[in-house]
Amino acid sequence: INILAIESSCDETSAAVISDGKILNNIIATQSVHEKYGGVVPELASRAHQQHLIPVIHEAIESSGISKNDLSAVAFTRGPGLMGALLVGVSFAKSFAYSLGIPLIEVNHMQAHILAHFIEDPKPKFPFICLTVSGGHTQLVLVKDHLVMEVIGETMDDAVGEAFDKTAKLLGLPYPGGPLIDKYAKEGNPKAFPFPVSDMPGLSYSFSGIKTAVLYFLRDQLKSNPNFIEENLTDLCASIQFTLIKMLMQKLKKAAAAHKINHIAIAGGVSANSGLRAELQLLAKKHGWSVYIPKFEYCTDNAAMIAMVGHYKYLKGEFCAMDVVPEARMKI
Ligand code: ATP
Ligand code: MG
Ligand code: FE
């Protein structure tokens, strides 16, 4: 079984080929046009996908050593994501599958972030809890099988990746600010500036408060010292990161205890964060958890994870019709 997978939900254009469950490659074109706008501009993303898609797919097929005519199916991200960006990938996937006379497989991008864990060993044991943390989502997911999963907690407002990026913007850092906060935090004191930790009912998260807290804090400090940010950048980054990780871990611990599960995984772009990874290893020791952290390149958006879902769906014969349309707010 050879499947071509396509990802175009946000600002990464990516294609991968999977053969009998083994990922052969993972070609990713990241869009840099958004940097100067401090966030992804949807229309620019769609246009960049149009430019990148064919070269990226061409490279994926060429380097896989598998001929187009030996492909068994085309898997694509149906949602969630930006409508215009998704449309580019979905339209290409449909016409490509149609022209080759092979089936189409729709993939939920959030499910794919979780199945990134099945690309390489060690693979998590079912059931496990996955904390999915990305630019658009923050979810606690109870994963019972490759394609059987249930969201048991999520954010009521902003995603944690958004909180990283928006507070970074307040510090004058370019988009995406998450990796930069991570970098500067390594040299700072996480307890320098105590920002408020929200506590929502049950397993719900809220990340909109910290943005406002940082905004007002900076406004007050800048009044007496216009160089406050430059002089305290590492401490500010460390404190913001510390607060966000604390909130994430609070509910993760609660979820693990409530469901009596000690296999814990993280997924999504923010799982690249070194502070989060370190904290998770600490908690693993303390609570006797087995912790699973995907390789860096499989944390952020990529088509290899889409291919993984495609593989499991192919085995179950879960194909979709040719009149499928993207779904911007698709749920797990
Ligand atoms: P979604 O998957 O919800 O549709 P997305 O695809 O935009 O959203 P990803 O590409 O999975 O999200 O992740 C991007 C996010 O990860 C950005 O918010 C970025 O700042 C954040 N991120 C990446 N690396 C790090 C890091 N080292 N520390 C903190 N955040 C990071
Ligand atoms: Mg992205
Ligand atoms: Fe993503």
Image (spheres, grey):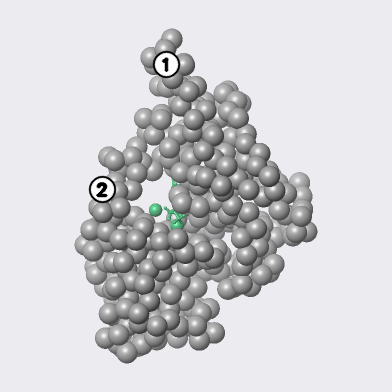
Quadrant in which ligand 3 is drawn: bottom left
Q: State how far apart marks 1 and 2 are (Cα).
A: 30 Å
Q: Residue 157 at what x, y percent from top left?
A: 52, 45
Residue visible at 29% across and 73% down in the picture: 91
Could you classify mark 2 by the number of other residues whose Cα lies within 10 Å: few (under 14), some (14-19), or many (20 or more)? some
Q: Residue 160 at what x, y percent from top left?
A: 52, 45
Q: Earlier in the sequence, mark 1 or mark 2?
A: 2
Residue visible at 57% across and 23% down in the picture: 193
The residue beneath circle 1 is: 222
Left or right: residue 319 compared with residue 290: left
Q: Residue 101 at what x, y percent from top left?
A: 32, 89
Could you classify mark 1 by the number of other residues whose Cα lies within 10 Å: few (under 14), some (14-19), or many (20 or more)? few
- Position of the C terminus, as image quadrant, is bottom right
The residue beneath circle 2 is: 33
Residue type pointed to by label 2: Val
Mark 2: secondary structure: loop
Residue visible at 34% across and 61% down in the picture: 83
Q: Residue 308 at what x, y percent from top left?
A: 49, 72
Mark 1: secondary structure: helix
- Position of the N terminus, as image quadrant, is bottom left
Residue visible at 53% across and 33% down in the picture: 210
Q: Assess whether mark 2 and mark 1 are in contact (beta carbons under 8 angstroms).
A: no
* 310 versus 292 height, above or below: below
Q: Quadrant of residue 89?
A: bottom left
